[in-house]
Structures are given as C-alpha cells and as structure tokens.
Image (tube, helix red, strand yellow):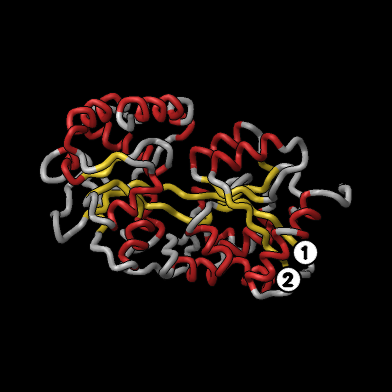
Amino acid sequence: MSRPNLNRRTFLGGTAGLAGATLMGRPALAAGSVTAAIYPGTWEEAFRDIVAPALMEEHDIDLQLDPAYAVDQIAKARAARGLPPFDVFVLDPGPAASGLEMGLYAPLDLSKLTNAGKLPEAFVSETGVPVAAQVVGIGYNPTKLDAPSGWAALFEDPYASRLGLTGFQTTFGTTSLIEIAKAFGGSQTDIDPAMARIQEILPKVAAVAQPASMAGLFQQGQIDVMYTNTQTVANLKGRGVDIEFAVPDTGAIAFVTTMHLVEDAENPDNAHKYIDTVISQGVQSRLMEAPFNFVPVNGDVELIASLPMASLDEMSSFVRHDWGEINPLRPGWIERFNREVAK
C-alpha cells in the first residue's frame, strides 16, 4: 500500500534521522529504515550502541528509536488512526496482553525470523517474540544485611526499617507485591494481605518512592533492601555499589519483554529484519555484557555466572503470572497504593 510523501517517515528522516546519523557516526542515507519504540534509559542507550550498528551492517537499514514507556506506546498506537508512529512495539507482559486485546498487532512471519528457533518456545507466538528476559527477586546490601530468606522476611527487622517500597506501576513492582500478598495468604488477584502488612510497617520503612527512584536511593544508602530485577542489581554493582541478588524461598519471578509488529506498520519487512537482529546470538551476547546487563533469550548465548540460572530452560520453573487476570485489577491497585501508601 502506497503512502503520501509527507508522512511519519518523511518527518523522522528530516529530524531524528539526521540526528541519529550524526550520533551513530554512520551514513545518513541507507537502503531502508525502520522505526521502533524503545524504553527510555538503559534500553535506548543499549539499542543505539549495539542494535543500530548491527542492523546497519547486516541489512543496511537505518534504525530510528522512539523512546516511550509501554503505556505510552499503547496510547500512541491507539491514537494513530491508521498511521502508526512506529513499526515495532517493545512491551512487558501486562501492556503486551492489553495490546493483543485491542488488536494493535499484525501477525509476524516467523519464517522471516531466522533466529526464532533459538528462543524459548513457550514465549513465542504469532504476534510476538521475546527479546529479553527479566528475573525479579530481592536486592540487598550484603555489608549491612544478611540475605533475606523470602518476601515475608522483608516485613521483619532488620529488613523492614531499611526497605524501599514502590507500587504497581511496573511489572517488577506488580509481580513482587503479588508474591508478597501470597506470602501472607493472598493470591494473584487478592493483594489485601500485602497492603495490610505494608500499613503495619509503613511508619518505619526507609522510603516509599517511584520505581525509577529506587536504584538511586539504594546507591545513596537511603535504602538497603528492595524488590527489583537482576538487571538493576548488575547495573548498580557495575557502579561499585554493594548489592547482591537474593532468590526468595518461593522462587524468583520470571517474565519476558516482547516485540510486536504494529498493525499497518509502514516497513514490515524491515521490522522483521530488525527483530531478527535483536534476537541474534551476537547482539544478545553483547546486550548481556556490562554496562547493559540484559538477560538473553537466544539459547545459543552462554549465560554469565552472575545470572540466577545456568540455562534459559530453568525459567520454566520460575514464578510466572497470568496477566489476563491481573490487567483488569491493576489500575485499581495503582490508585490504592498511591492513596494509602505513597500519600
């Protein structure tokens, strides 16, 4: 289907495209282009440094990145009215399930993804493939605290007074609070026990903050224990921070971040090449290394010793969650946490 000359790609080519070419030190003109949503921060930096050059070298495709958190990606796509602002989503499980329900994805042609066979089969579907894994547990300062045994231990001394709390805005926060609820008799859909225990210790917790602030609070020594993912722990250790990752006695939480082809994507062929580049062994290996510390999903990548598993197959035994059940309840949980805890 042809498009008018004055469209999204024309605009990006004249602004972000030129800036990207200058930053990347590569030619402004390429055989093709693709625009991909990307999480701001570590993800954006990693994809500019590693994925963009690999895509250019392998396919002569210019990568334009549109930094946006998951909920903003969904909102942009819904408001686009047939002219999507990017070709590829990158989403955690909750927003990914919402996008599927809204019909925002085009089917992927897995025959065009030469590396799809290297991915954990359980996470591959006709509308999305995993590009990074997340492993969630407890980060703690080993110079001040012993490793906590599990989620319930966080609500006892000496952990409670050094604990950093954050809410349901993120996938790691939501899943951690669900597991805390389960430790006190709750369930995937009943977080009342977690909220009750939080109220009990709230007067003495070290901090209640937004998710993006937790790493900084830990680095500054304002908190010494928090629920978090292995990537955050590795990033802090790389800065010389005293931190270790503890697997709770009920097991670490695992989920994957996935990429999806946007319905009516402007460059679907290039989008497939982009996704295939992201999941290739070489790119996955480099993303796993410091300073980015991604957990790879390509089975040919030899995992580094700091990860809490020896192979990706072990992820099938980690704690997973049903986002079809969680998503309808999550907005209310966010509002309740903000009202009762972050007030």
Relative side of 230 to 327, left or right: left
Residue 230 x, y percent position in the rendering = 35, 56
- Residue density around tag 2, few if under 14, some if 14–19, many if 20 or more, within 10 Å: some
Q: Position of residue 86 (x, y in %)?
A: 69, 49
181 is higher (above) or lower (below) than 304: above
Instruction: Relative to 118, say whether 3 is above or below.
Output: above
Residue 248 or residue 2, whichever sits in front: 2
Looking at the rendering, which quadrant does residue 305 occupy?
bottom left
Judging depth in this view, the residue of 269 and 140 nearest the camera is: 140
- The residue drawn where x is 47% and y is 49% is 256
**Which one is nearer the viewer's eye here, 118 or 254?**
254
Rendered residue at 57%/53% (across/down): 38
Q: Residue at x 58, y 40 (%)?
A: 72
Q: Is residue 270 visible?
A: no
The amino acid type, in three-letter code, at marker 1 is: Gly
**Circle 1: element type:** strand
Name the residue carrying label 1: 32
Residue 319 visible to an observer of this rendering: yes
Q: Is residue 107 left or right of residue 230?
A: right
- Check if mark 2's residue and mark 1's residue have beta carbons within 8 Å: yes
Give percent across and percent down for residue 291: 42, 68
| Cα gap from disc 2 to disc 1, whole angstroms | 7 Å
Give percent across and percent down for residue 112: 69, 59
Of label 2 and label 1, which has the lower sequence position? 1
144 up-or-down from 185: above or below = below
Kindly state the secondary structure of the residue where label 2 is placed: loop
Give the residue pinned by disc 2: 60
Amino acid under disc 2: Asp
Q: Residue at x 50, y 45 (%)?
A: 92
Q: How many other residues sit within 10 Å of disc 1, few (<14), some (14-19) or many (≥20)?
A: some
Q: Residue furthest left?
A: 157
Question: Looking at this view, is 277 or 334 the one in front?
Answer: 334
